[in-house]
Image (cartoon, rainbow, N blue to C red):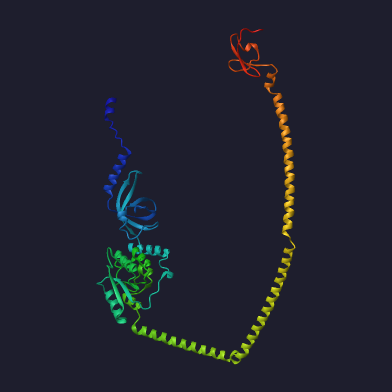
Amino acid sequence: MSQLQFNLIPERKVWTVSQLTARIRDVLSASFTGIWVEGEVSNFKEAQSGHLYFTLKDESAQIRCVCFRNSAMRLKFRPEDGLKARVRGSISVYEPRGEYQIYVEHIEPVGVGELQLAFEQLKKKLGEEGLFDAARKKPLPMLPGRIGVITSPSGAALRDILRILRRRFPNVRVLIYPVRVQGEGAAGEIAAALKFFTARAAADVLILARGGGSLEDLWAFNEEKVARAIAASHIPVISAVGHETDFTIADFVADVRASTPSAAAEIVVQTREAFDNHIRQLLLSLGERLQYIILDRRHRLQELFAHRAFRRPEEIVRLYRQRTDELSLRLGDALRVRLERLRKRFIEARARVASFDLRTRLSALRSRMDQRNVELTRRVERLLVVKRQRFERLVLQLEERSPLRVLERGYAIVYDSAGRVVRAADQVGVGDEVSVRLARGRLIAEIKRRAE
């Protein structure tokens, strides 16, 4: 019975962590594809690779999300913390951490349009950078010789601009750079046109124009690349995009905003009549100014004629001549006093030099030097005598203490075969050779016997 029960126990299946995670991933990927999830964005981060990472949450739960670069590039806006959004994608498992997450393919803001949100985000970003500041706006030329127009060649905006320019100032030169003003790639063409005019300084003023349309139609003028190209332009730019109620990022960055393309043409050139009136006003102002200057100079001339200098010129000349003579006399007296003082100082110096006999002084110095030489010679001689006597005493002492003087008295010094002095008989043996040092000469002897 126990054997039967043992056989009925099912076989145990053991999963590895990787196998279990992969199985969960397959189940989730197959069951949750192309789903829409709504929640609040938090912990948003954009990696250097261009991938977007964030968390989607509601009151009681949250889920991680990742939007890879190829999908993020298609977004008109960037998610931010606190944004209510809907995301479309599929659910899978990130196996290294065992976490399930949404692989996002598309994001839509809730409560506000995608393009409107992108518009507000870019407007805030460029505003903080100072691209909208009035201080950086360039003034328009009063009468441009060349006007650059960036717009579609087939649009009504170009026709309106050319019509007004021909009517107001027919001899103005217009340079047209044709671009697409709507659709994919339009922003790149507009930015390239702005860079073209800036690099070549081909115009005195630029008109960026397009007719009215929806936010989607005007979106090329809300692109960041167009805004930065306008800001980088050294040529003043007039933005004439859409109708009077339409506003784009280009309007905020441009030096001047025109409500319509026609208004831009009216702004950029004055009418011939207005220009002629302006010239007449300038001429009138110039004439009045010249008349005032002439009257003022005439009045000043009359005042000069009335001055006493013109009534008595000879008296003034005599006065200055007399002052010149006085100054000349004073200068002569001062120079004479100065010369007399210098002459006295010279005479005194010459007398002092004459009283100072250099030859007598040199003779006295020579006599003192000879005397010092004699004294020095005597001192050296005395010192040499003392040193010589001391040397002789030391020589005598050395000779008296020399071992050779002992040998002169009949003594001898015995050395063994190793050259050592023999001081005792037991230092040598019978038959050893010894060397005997005498006062004059040396003997070699052999030991025959030792006397105890």
| Image position of 328 (left or right of 56) | right
Quadrant that contains the C terminus: top right
Q: Position of residue 261 (x, y in %)?
A: 31, 75
Viewer-closest of 216 and 194: 194
The quadrant in which residue 363 appears is bottom right
Residue 219 visible, this angle: no
The quadrant in which residue 9 appears is top left
From the viewer's perspective, is residue 358 above or below residue 14?
below
Residue 48 visible, this angle: yes
Q: Position of residue 372 (x, y in %)?
A: 74, 47
Quadrant that contains the N terminus: top left
| Image position of 395 (left or right of 39) | right
Viewer-closest of 200 and 237: 200
Please name the residue shown 70% across and 25% down the image: 399
Please name the residue shown 30% across and 64% down the image: 188
Viewer-closest of 138 and 345: 345
The quadrant in which residue 221 appears is bottom left
Q: Position of residue 236 (x, y in %)?
A: 37, 72
Q: How many marks?
A: 0
From the viewer's perspective, is residue 111 above or below residue 389?
below
Q: Position of residue 68 (x, y in %)?
A: 32, 52
